[in-house]
Image (spheres, rainbow, N blue to C red):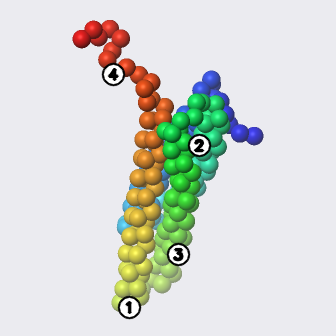
Amino acid sequence: MSLTVVNGLPAHVLIVHFVIVLVPLSALAVVVCAIWPSAARRMGVVLPLLALVTLAGVPLATQAGEWLEEHVDSNALVRRHAELGDGLLPWAAGLLVLATVIWWTARRSAAADVESGEPSRPAATRSATAVRVVTAVLCIGVAAGAVVDVYRIGDSGAKAAWQDGFSKTARGDNG
């Protein structure tokens, strides 16, 4: 079963807005939690759940978009939009993997702090800091890639939908 039409509108037009909001939101949350461990502990399981919902929205939007592509006149702009849309899933999957790693690490770190009750050794602290820096850089890269990809897909979709579809002057404008 596929979602094709909602309240008389193509479902793609509606579903895509969830993706447009959730991908940058997930990307921001992943980066903030990677840089700020207390934020990761506060968000808890919400972080990977947000990324999971984001990931689930991508194939829904893609599937609805494929249906819509079959029901509109095909041109280079529509084909370019469809090609770009197919590239978002790996970015969303990367956000989910990183969100899960951050959540799991924050959970383990919080549990270890409670159990030990003593300060960490300097060598262990340096190692943990190095891992956190590498993770943060990776998160920034994946988040930036995901957000840029969403922008490129949305821009190509807007061009495909609106190219030559409106007048640059208002109907009542005679000048």
Answer whether labels 2 and 3 touch (C-beta < 8 Å).
no
Q: Amino acid at mark 4?
A: Lys
The spot of residue 45 in percent (x, y) is: 55, 60
Residue annotated with mark 3: 108
Q: CA distance from mark 4 to mark 1?
A: 64 Å
Which of the marked residues, 1 or 2, is nearer the chain's N terminus? 2
Of circles 3 and 4, the one toward us is: 4
Query: Residue farthest to the front?
Result: 76
Residue drawn at x 50%, y 80% is: 112
- Residue nearer the viewer, 68 or 141: 68
Give the quarter of the figure containing the N terminus.
Answer: top right
Answer whether labels 2 and 4 touch (C-beta < 8 Å).
no
Of circles 3 and 1, the one toward us is: 1
- Residue nearer the viewer, 68 or 113: 68
Q: Amino acid at mark 3?
A: Arg
Which of the marked residues, 3 or 4, is nearer the chain's N terminus? 3
Disc number placed over residue 104 in the picture, else none:
none
Horizontally, residue 114 falls left or right of residue 12, namely left
The spot of residue 162 in percent (x, y) is: 45, 29
Residue drawn at x 40%, y 58% is: 144
Q: CA distance from mark 3 to mark 1?
A: 18 Å
Above or below, comparing residue 129 to residue 139 in the picture: below
Q: CA distance from mark 1 to mark 2?
A: 47 Å
Disc number placed over residue 168 in the picture, else none:
4
Residue annotated with mark 1: 123
Of circles 4 and 1, the one toward us is: 4
